[in-house]
C-alpha cells in the first residue's frame, strides 16, 4: 500500500512539473510574440524626398527603413519606435515627426525593429535583439553622415535608445519619450496575472528557446554610463501604459545635471507630439541645439 501511495504522489509531482513546464512554454511564446503591424504611408505622402534603405543589425538581422537627408545637416536623428509600432506609426505621428526634423535641417533615419513592419525576425527578443537593431542603426547613420547622432525613442524604443547610448560612445543626445526603467518591469506588468514563479520560469524558457533575454535592457542600471550624453525625458502624467515613475526613476539614476524632464498632464502613452506638435518640436530642437554644439559638416563617408 505504501509503495502504491508513493507511486501516486510521484505521479502527481511529475504531472505538476509537466503542467508548469507547458504553462511556462506557452507564456514564453506569448511574451515573445511580436506585434507586426503593416507599414502604412511613407514620407512621399508629405512630398518628402527619401530613400528606402536596408541595413544590418549588429547581429546581422536585415532591417528596413527610410533615410531622409538634409544637406549640411548639423545633426542626424535616429527614430526608434515603440514595441507595438513601426516606422510610420500613426498613433505617434512618426511620419510628421520625420518631416518636422527634416525641415529643421536634420538628417532622419526611421526604421522597423526586428519582427515589426517590414524588417526580418520572427520573435520579440524582449530587448536583447532589438538593442542590436539600434546599434546597427547608429552604425548605418555614421556611414551616411559625419553629423552628431541624436537617438529619439518612444516607449520601449526610448529605453533601447538609452541603453544604446550607454553601449555606443559618441551618441550626442537622447530624447526618451515615455521610457520604461527596465524591460523586465515592463513585461511583468503586461503579464501581471501570471504567478511570480511561472513568470520567472517563462523568462528562462524565452531566453533558452528564443534568445530573448528579459534583463538585456534595463536603462535604470546604465544611466551613469552614458558618458555625459544629455537626455531629454518626455512623459505624460496620464500615461496608463507606462507610469511616469519609470521616467522619474531613470532621471534619478542619472548623475548628469544637464538632463531635462518635460511632463504633460494629458496625451497618454507617447502622445505628447500628437497633442501639440509645435511645442514638442520647439522643446526637442532647443534641447538638441543645447546638447550638441554647432557642427561643421565633413565630407560624407564612402
Image (cartoon, rainbow, N blue to C red):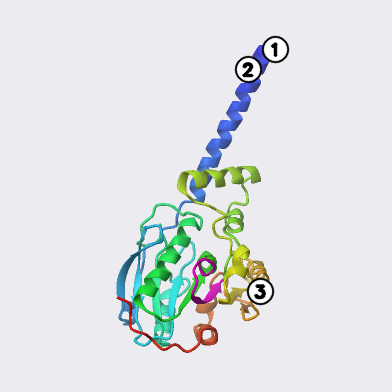
State yes or no: discs 2 and 1 in contact (Cβ < 8 Å). Answer: no
Q: Which mark is residue 255?
A: 3
Residue neighbourhood size for the residue with mark 1, other residues' Cα within 10 Å, grouped as few (<14), some (14–19), many (≥20): few
37 over 154 or under it: above or below: above
Location of the C terminus by quadrant is bottom left
Marks 3 and 1, the one that precedes in the sequence = 1
Give the alpha-carbon distance from disc 2 to disc 1, as whole Å.
8 Å
Residue 23: horizontal and vertical position, in percent?
A: 55, 39
The boundaries of the magenta stretch are: 164-177
How many numbered callouts? 3
Residue 163: horizontal and vertical position, in percent?
A: 54, 65
Residue 295 located left or right of residue 241: left
Give the alpha-carbon distance from disc 3 to disc 1, as whole Å.
65 Å
Nearest the viewer among 43 and 260 is 260
Give the alpha-carbon distance from disc 2 to disc 3, as whole Å.
60 Å
209 over 80 or under it: above or below: above
State yes or no: discs 3 and 1 in contact (Cβ < 8 Å). Answer: no
The residue that mark 1 highlights is 2
Amino acid at each position: 500500500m505504501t509503495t502504491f501511495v508513493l507511486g501516486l504522489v510521484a505521479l502527481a509531482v511529475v504531472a505538476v512539473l509537466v503542467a508548469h513546464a507547458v504553462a511556462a512554454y506557452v507564456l514564453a511564446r506569448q511574451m515573445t510574440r511580436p506585434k507586426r503591424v503593416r507599414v502604412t504611408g511613407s514620407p512621399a505622402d508629405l512630398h518628402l524626398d527619401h530613400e528606402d534603405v536596408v541595413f544590418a543589425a549588429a547581429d546581422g538581422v536585415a532591417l528596413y527603413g527610410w533615410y531622409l537627408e538634409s544637406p549640411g545637416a548639423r545633426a542626424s536623428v535616429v527614430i526608434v519606435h515603440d514595441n507595438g509600432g513601426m516606422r510610420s506609426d500613426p498613433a505617434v505621428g512618426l511620419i510628421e515627426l520625420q518631416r518636422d526634423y527634416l525641415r529643421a535641417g536634420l538628417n532622419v533615419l526611421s526604421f522597423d525593429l526586428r519582427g515589426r513592419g517590414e524588417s526580418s525576425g520572427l520573435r520579440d527578443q524582449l530587448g536583447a535583439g532589438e538593442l542590436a537593431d539600434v546599434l546597427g542603426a547608429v552604425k548605418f547613420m555614421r556611414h551616411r553622415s559625419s553629423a552628431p547622432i541624436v537617438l529619439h525613442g518612444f516607449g520601449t524604443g526610448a529605453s533601447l535608445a538609452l541603453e544604446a547610448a550607454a553601449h555606443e560612445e559618441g551618441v550626442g543626445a537622447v530624447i526618451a519619450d515615455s521610457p520604461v526603467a527596465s524591460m523586465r518591469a515592463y513585461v511583468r506588468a503586461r503579464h501581471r496575472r501570471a504567478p511570480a514563479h511561472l513568470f520567472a520560469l517563462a523568462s528562462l524558457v524565452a531566453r533558452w528557446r528564443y534568445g530573448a533575454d528579459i534583463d538585456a535592457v534595463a536603462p535604470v542600471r546604465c544611466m551613469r554610463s552614458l558618458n555625459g550624453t544629455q537626455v531629454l525625458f518626455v512623459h505624460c502624467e496620464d500615461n496608463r501604459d507606462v507610469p511616469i515613475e519609470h521616467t522619474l526613476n531613470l532621471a534619478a539614476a542619472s548623475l548628469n545635471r544637464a538632463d531635462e524632464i518635460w511632463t504633460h498632464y494629458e496625451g497618454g502613452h507617447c502622445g505628447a507630439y500628437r497633442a501639440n506638435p509645435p511645442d514638442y518640436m520647439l522643446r526637442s530642437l532647443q534641447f538638441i541645439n543645447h546638447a550638441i554644439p554647432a557642427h561643421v559638416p565633413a565630407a560624407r563617408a564612402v
